[in-house]
Image (tube, helix red, strand yellow):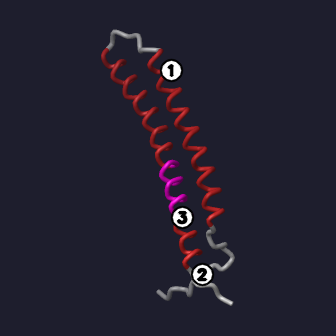
Amino acid sequence: MNEPNITPDSSTPAPTPLRCITGATISGGLAYAMYSLMIAIATTFAAKPIHSDNPMVMNIGSAVRTLVVGIVALGMAIFAIVTLGLLALAVQLLIQQLTKPKEN
């Protein structure tokens, strides 16, 4: 029932604008790569239609194609949002550094 005293880990480095911009660059690169992958997958699916007379095959094939493109689009959106968040954090840290009074 007693909760142990948890002290904050002081070995974690504080975020800096440079680290945020570096992370945003990496995340943005991954978002662009996933965007390119999504476009390639969608183009491939559009170029190769499903050839079947069975309606169940058509429905399942359409659902699978939609799910594949949707999952890649979701991954791309997550990396894009992370990129925007890291860029916003970098701007916030820069503003805080510029407005903080200098200590002598």
Looking at this view, is 36 or 7 the one in front? 36
Residue position marked by numbered label 3 in the rendering: 91
**Quadrant position of residue 16:** bottom right
Q: Nearer the viewer, mark 3 or mark 2?
A: 3
Name the residue carrying label 1: 44
Mark 2 closeness class: few <14, some 14–19, many ≥20 residues within 10 Å: few
Can you give x and y, in whole percent of width and height, for residue 36 in the image? Answer: 55, 33
| Among the two numbered marks 2 and 1 on one chain, the one whose residue lies closer to the N terminus | 2
Report the residue at 50% width, 20% height from top: 44
Q: Earlier in the sequence, mark 3 or mark 2?
A: 2
The residue tagged 2 is 8
**Percent coordinates x, y for residue 34 in the rendering:** 55, 38
Q: Of helix, strand and loop, which mostly describes the magenta segment?
A: helix
Q: Is residue 85 above or below residue 16?
A: above
Residues marked 3 and 2 touching at CB (< 8 Å): no
* Kind of residue at disc 1: Thr
Q: CA distance from mark 1 to mark 3?
A: 40 Å
Nearest to N terminus: mark 1 or mark 3: 1
- Looking at the image, is mark 1 or mark 3 nearer the viewer? 3
Distance from disc 2 to disc 1, alpha carbons, whole Å, reads 50 Å
> From which residue to which does the magenta span run?
79-90
